[in-house]
Image (cartoon, rainbow, N blue to C red):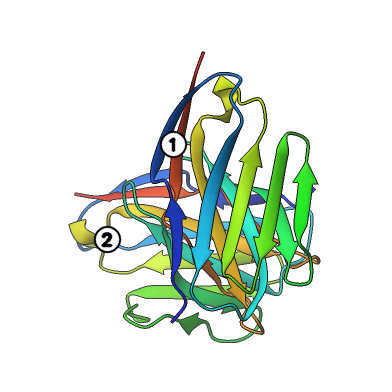
Amino acid sequence: GAVVSQHPSRVICKSGTSVKIECRSLDFQATTMFWYRQFPKQSLMLMATSNEGSKATYEQGVEKDKFLINHASLTLSTLTVTSAHPEDSSFYICSARGGRHEQYFGPGTRLTVT
Amino acid sequence: KQEVTQIPAALSVPEGENLVLNCSFTDSAIYNLQWFRQDPGKGLTSLLLIQSSQREQTSGRLNASLDKSSGRSTLYIAASQPGDSATYLCAVEKSGFQKLVFGTGTRLLVSP
């Protein structure tokens, strides 16, 4: 149980375009999901907390107009990277909070902006 | 601001050894602490979660302890196997905030 999926697993896009990443909790409902970013050989950095039916809460230094988060249902949150640039290239991971307060993580999405 | 540090940053051991990974955090007001495993290019797999009121948790060959007052947790891996090779991350959740703060990670390599 407690499976979180992400789609796509890898995406390559051109500079200036927008990319949407989906995060789904497959076998449980998650009122709260989290989006992280991970640079090579570094730890995870929390970008934002996504709450179902309300606006996301962004961490300091994260541009909310660039990283649009929508949590439209109890099983789906999306992250849209708008007007992507090469410096946005990274590994994006989502997580969903389960009933025992554990966080379950998706497999990640590798974004490459050319 | 909570800071989480893991020592060592990298560890290489022969198969069969018992080993200890360390995690320290600066703010003891935590709700829980979680240990994760991450394989290269993959997401995170939750290994053990210790609530702030608990001292340790065990799962198979893994044992995690928590000493909240000193800001420390250890992950003990018994009889290590090559399949244990991965990066191990600890993360703490501050009371009432739900957000996880991750440690710097320990890259483990177990040689056959």
Residue at image point 77% right, 52% down: B57
Query: What amino acid type is highlighted by mark number 1?
Result: Pro
- Identify the element where label 2 is drawn: helix
Residue at image point 66% right, 65% down: B67
Q: Is residue B5 visible in this depiction of the protein?
A: yes
Q: Nearer the viewer, residue A112 or B46?
A: B46
The residue most toward the top is B112
Residue at image point 78% right, 42% down: B59
Give the chain letter at badge 2.
A
Query: What amino acid type is highlighted by mark number 2?
Result: Asp
Q: Position of residue A21 (x, y in %)?
A: 47, 58
Badge 2 density bin: few <14, some 14–19, many ≥20, Cα 10 Å: some
Q: Quick check: marks 2 and 1 in contact, CB under 8 Å? A: no
Label 2, label 1: how many angstroms apart (C-alpha)? 20 Å
**Residue placed under numbered mark 2 in the picture:** A88
Give the chain letter at badge 1.
B
- Identify the element where label 1 is drawn: loop
**Residue placed under numbered mark 1 in the picture:** B40
Q: Is residue A65 above or below residue B10?
A: below
